[in-house]
Structures are given as C-alpha cells and as structure tokens.
Image (cartoon, grey):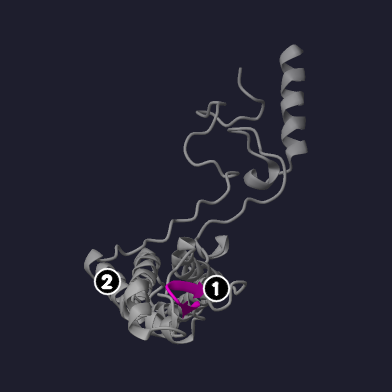
Amino acid sequence: MTVPNTPAGSEAGPTEGHDPFAPPVFPKPEREPRDVLPELRIGLLIAVAGAVLGVVLGLLWLWIAPRVMFEVKGDRILYADPEGEQRVGADGVFALLGLGAGVLTALVAFLLTRRRGGGIAVAAGLAVGGLAGSVIGWQLGTRLGPTSDLVAHARQLGEGGHFSAPLQLGAQGALLVWPMTAMVVLLALSAAFGKREEDPPPYWASGDQWPAAGPAPAPGLQTGSQTGSPAGSQLGEGESGEGQARH
C-alpha cells in the first residue's frame, strides 16, 4: 500500500544509508608512535642520577644521624644513656632524607620532561633510582661508620673510654620512602601542571550538522514546501478525483 500523494515510481520504505538524526561522529585524533629508544634512555638517566644522589644521602645520614654511645667499665661495655632513643632517631633521619630526595628528584624530572609529556619511563626511572639510591645510602652510611667489633674497640680505649655504636637502620621500610615520595609528587605535578591533550573539534567544525528539530517526514512523501504547492490543494484534488470516480 502506497502513501497518498506519493510520486510515481517511488515506494514507501525505510531509507538506506546515513541516518540524519544520528549524532555526529568525531574522528579520533591520530597519535604519533613514540620511539622506544629515547624512552629507555630517559629512564636510565633518571635511575643513574638517583643512584648517584644516594651517595650524598649516605654521607648526610652518617653526618647528622644521632649515635648510640657506649662506655667501658672494667670488663663490661655499658650504654652511656640506657634510656636514649638514638636508634629510632637514626631511622627517622634516614626517612626524612629519603623524603627530601624523593621530592627533589621528582620535581627535577618533571621540569625536564614536562615539554615532551613525561611518560612511563620517567616514573619507572624515579622508582628504580629512588630504591637504588636508598640502598646505596644505607650501605655507605653503615660501612663508613664506626666498627661493629665492639670488644676490640673497647680494649683499645681501655677503662672509662667512650665510643659510638655502628650506624644501623632498624626500620627497613625506610628504604621505600624515597621511591614512594617520588611517585606521589610526580603524580601530583602531572595532574596539576602536566601537558594536556587537545580537545576534539566542535561538531560544526567537523562538517557534520545537527538535524533540524521536528518530526521526520514519511519516506517518499513530499510536502507542500517540496512541491511548491500547498498540501491542502493536493489533498483536495485527490478527494475530488475520487468523487468523480464514484459518479
């Protein structure tokens, strides 16, 4: 059954092809693939810089960490301050130094790689370099500190002598302060001041237009505005034609 006033040769049915009422589809921005070699080079440089900075951390820890003191009385080695908290203080100093090193390395790495958009190599280099720097600083501070042979040191000093205990890191979790701090600071800086991707263009700039508001015309049906004559006159002619056919 055809719709009234349907031009000859046209059939009613669903239109094929593009739906005029479908929302516009924006093309996805093309991203240029990054070369892996520069990424690995940047991550390696950041990790090496962290390891070198670990030497500075170890020397600072050896210099400013509080020491546990002993004294020699007869054939015994006693604590000079039995209620002291120097061991806990040494762990705290190491953690604070790691905190400062993490903030410093993350800030420098972000400023140097901000223009290129950072990348996973920066985060990986900070994590590996921070952990390596913490281990190097820990080992350097303990090895350059006082000897661990307390008996030989006490015999060398004799009665009434005072000497410090070897520098030790009781809380091994302090080694993770540097890399964790670097990760948090890098994430915060990237979220606040990082490079932003360009927004997609608006729909009017992509060539697609939103359809005009209003009901969809029946397929194959021509309105008065399309034929140039009022629709009412066409319907009237159709009715008069039917009346003549009945007569």
Q: Is residue 121 above or below residue 57?
A: above
Residue 39 is inside the magenta segment: no
Residue nearer the viewer, 24 or 1: 24
Residue nearer the viewer, 170 or 41: 170
Quadrant containing the C terminus in the rendered view = top right
Residue identified by numbered label 1: 92
In this picture, which residue range is highlighted in magenta?
68-78
Q: Quadrant of residue 110?
A: bottom left
Which residue is at a point 38% across and 84% down the rendered structure image?
Answer: 158
Q: Amino acid at mark 1?
A: Gly
Q: Is residue 40 above or below residue 233?
A: below
Residue identified by numbered label 2: 44
Q: Is residue 58 left or right of residue 234?
A: left
Which residue is at a point 57% across and 44% down the rendered structure image?
Answer: 22
Q: Amino acid at mark 2?
A: Leu
Badge 2 element? helix
Query: Residue 52: x, y in percent?
Result: 31, 80
Which residue is at a point 22% across and 68% down the rendered structure image?
Answer: 37
Query: Residue 166: x, y in percent?
Result: 40, 75
Quadrant containing the N terminus in the rendered view = top right
Which residue is at a point 43% across and 76% down the rendered structure image?
Answer: 165
Q: Quadrant of residue 31?
A: bottom left
